[in-house]
Image: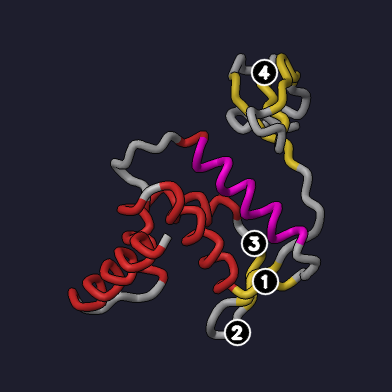
Amino acid sequence: MRCPFCGHDDTQVKDSRPTDDHAAIRRRRYCPACGARWTTFERVYLRELTVVKKNGDKAPFDREKLSRSLKIALRKRPVDDERIERIVNSIQRRLETLGEAEIPSKVIGEMAMEQLAQLDQVAYVRFASVYRNFREAKDFEQFVENLGDRGSAS
């Protein structure tokens, strides 16, 4: 692997270990040319996934984009980055096992909403406000009322 700091071609792996959920290998790397150290993650991809957006455009699935969206919803909430990574891994595995190469963005959004609903109600409402495109305060009111109805039904 090429050093991201100096571009040297011959870097060394100093330590490898599985992540907590065993979905990836974490590697500590070292560059003998400049002395820099960094971490990489190696993951298995069962298939290349393409996201089909609402307007019909297609883009490669970007797990970092999903992770950023969840982190925004969970900002200042008592949830650590490791938990977010497990959620992203779970969603990606579910998408890969669907057997489809093209996944509607709605499917990904619903999976994220499902995970957030179980994890943190505030983050769930935050994510829903963007995902479902709330425009007015009454949109929030209706969503939270339905949330309360769903909670009392279970």
- Relative to 120, is 109 above or below? below
Magenta region: 83-97
The amino acid beneath tag 3 is Phe
Point 62% across, 27% down: residue: 39
Q: Hey, which residue is sitting farthest left in the picture? A: 137
Residue on which the image places disc 2? 56
Residue on which the image places disc 1? 103
Point 77% across, 59% down: residue: 97
Of callouts 3 and 1, the N-terminal one? 3
Q: Nearer the viewer, mark 3 or mark 1?
A: 1
Residue on which the image places disc 4? 30
Query: How far separated are the C-alphas under marks 3 and 2?
Result: 14 Å
Q: Nearer the viewer, residue 111 or 153?
A: 153
Of callouts 4 and 1, the N-terminal one? 4
The amino acid beneath tag 4 is Tyr
Question: Position of 83 compared to 96: left or right?
Answer: left
Question: In which quadrant of the rendered view does residue 21 lie?
Answer: top right
The amino acid beneath tag 2 is Gly
Residue on which the image places disc 3? 61
Secondary structure beneath disc 1?
strand
Query: How far separated are the C-alphas under marks 4 and 1?
Result: 38 Å
Q: Residues within 10 Å of mark 4 (few under 14, many from 20)?
A: some
Query: How far separated are the C-alphas under marks 4 and 2?
Result: 43 Å
Asked if residue 62 lies in the magenta stretch, the reply is no
Q: Dots 3 and 1: beta carbons under 8 Å?
A: yes
Secondary structure beneath disc 4?
strand
